[in-house]
Image: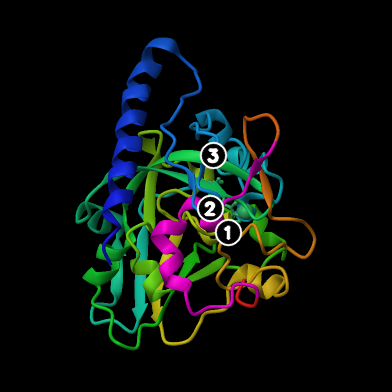
Amino acid sequence: MALPKEYRIKEQEVTDHALYLRRREFIVGSMVFAVSAFTHNAAKGEQTKPDQLTPKRAVTSYNNFYEFGTDKRSPAKLAKDFKTEPWFVAVEGHCAKPGKYPLEDLVLSQQIEERIYRLRCVEAWSMVIPWKGFELGPLLKSFEPTADAKFVRFETLYDPVQMPGQKRKVLQWPYVEGLTIQEAMHPLTFIATGLYGEDLPNQNGAPLRLVVPWKYGFKSIKSIVRISFEKEMPRTSWNLSAPHEYGFYANVNPNVDHPRWSQATERRIGERGRRDTLMFNGYEQAVAGLYTDLDLTKWY
Ligand SMILES: Nc1nc2c(c(=O)[nH]1)N[C@H]1C(S)=C(S)[C@@H](COP(=O)(O)O)O[C@H]1N2
Ligand SMILES: [Mo]
């Protein structure tokens, strides 16, 4: 599926502008960048507050990565010595080329680029992050999925010695997430290997993590070791832990509240006040077509 032309141009502009600003960062130190306002609220036809890149310090010190503790400050501390070399990704299920692939082989064959994406957590905070990585779709296609591949299931490493959070059963380990094959092949769906022009810090999901910008943050699974093409919708860690709170789709939706809190607004990390949460996290134009036949109140 091709990205709508209009959207692609905007994304390009944002990326160029951010690169320009980052070059300036070398000169002025830690400033907050203004990123061109590509956020557009289609429903109201209004321009919303412009996005700014979230300072790198916040992006790398305020993390959800339960394998390294449930406290947001823990991952930056407890993942310091996490070993990400060597790293292999097992590819399984309905495809012609299953196997255990060294990370280098997977990354080297892909077109590396930088993408600025909003990440909005289900807990109603959000960030704007310059990711480095590649589109997931071409990688998946290289494994030649068959017609039975309706879903893609992702798994994080299970290693309680290195990941002390796994000694407590706060979630079912290993962490599992999933997408429909259409979502996985969508041109916005991204595998990040870095951020702010550098390799991914361990607390952000080194050496490779998913980024699905129109879904709640928990879909963006970190430190992936297994990708599997499945016929049935996979059960995911959050869905298993609280099915009424976390559905399979987890699309950012200001109109469907979490049972314990509103999803209408969010706190942008580093900003004063709150801002309106946008449908599909502001990526509505690009992704709404995936859900035209889906009742989003039922399939949250
Ligand atoms: N393996 C794994 N992946 C995970 C999580 C986790 O606990 N374990 N937390 C998720 C949640 S809830 C969010 S909001 C994002 C946070 O990503 P960040 O720390 O890079 O901002 O990671 C997601 N990926
Ligand atoms: Mo989250």
Q: Is residue 109 magenta?
A: no
Question: Are discs 2 and 1 less than 8 Å apart at CB?
Answer: yes
Where is mark 3, residue-wise?
Answer: 48
- Identity of the residue drawn at 70% across and 75% down: 243
Question: How packed is label 1: few (under 14 Cα within 10 Å), some, or many (20 or more)?
Answer: many
Relative placement, left or right, of 203 versus 271 is left
| Disc nearer the start of the sequence (1/3) | 3
| Farthest residue, direction top | 27
Disc 3 marks a residue whose amino acid type is: Thr
| Disc nearer the start of the sequence (2/1) | 1
Residue 82 in sight from this viewpoint: no
Where is mark 1, residue-wise?
Answer: 252
Whether label 2 lies within 8 Å of ligand 1 gets the answer: no
Where is mark 2, residue-wise?
Answer: 281
**Which quarter of the figure is the N terminus placed in?**
bottom left
- Identity of the residue drawn at 55% across and 35% down: 49
Disc 2 marks a residue whose amino acid type is: Asn
Q: Is residue 290 magenta?
A: yes
* Numbered range of the magenta stretch: 274-297
Question: Are discs 2 and 3 less than 8 Å apart at CB?
Answer: no
Depth check, front residue: 139 or 70: 139
Marks 2 and 3, how far apart at CA: 12 Å
Question: Are discs 1 and 3 less than 8 Å apart at CB?
Answer: no
Relative placement, left or right, of 44 versus 130 is right
Q: Which image quadrant for residue 35?
A: top left
Disc 1 marks a residue whose amino acid type is: Val
Marks 1 and 3, how far apart at CA: 17 Å
State the image coordinates of residue 26 (x, y, percent, origin top left): 37, 16
| Farthest residue, direction left | 109
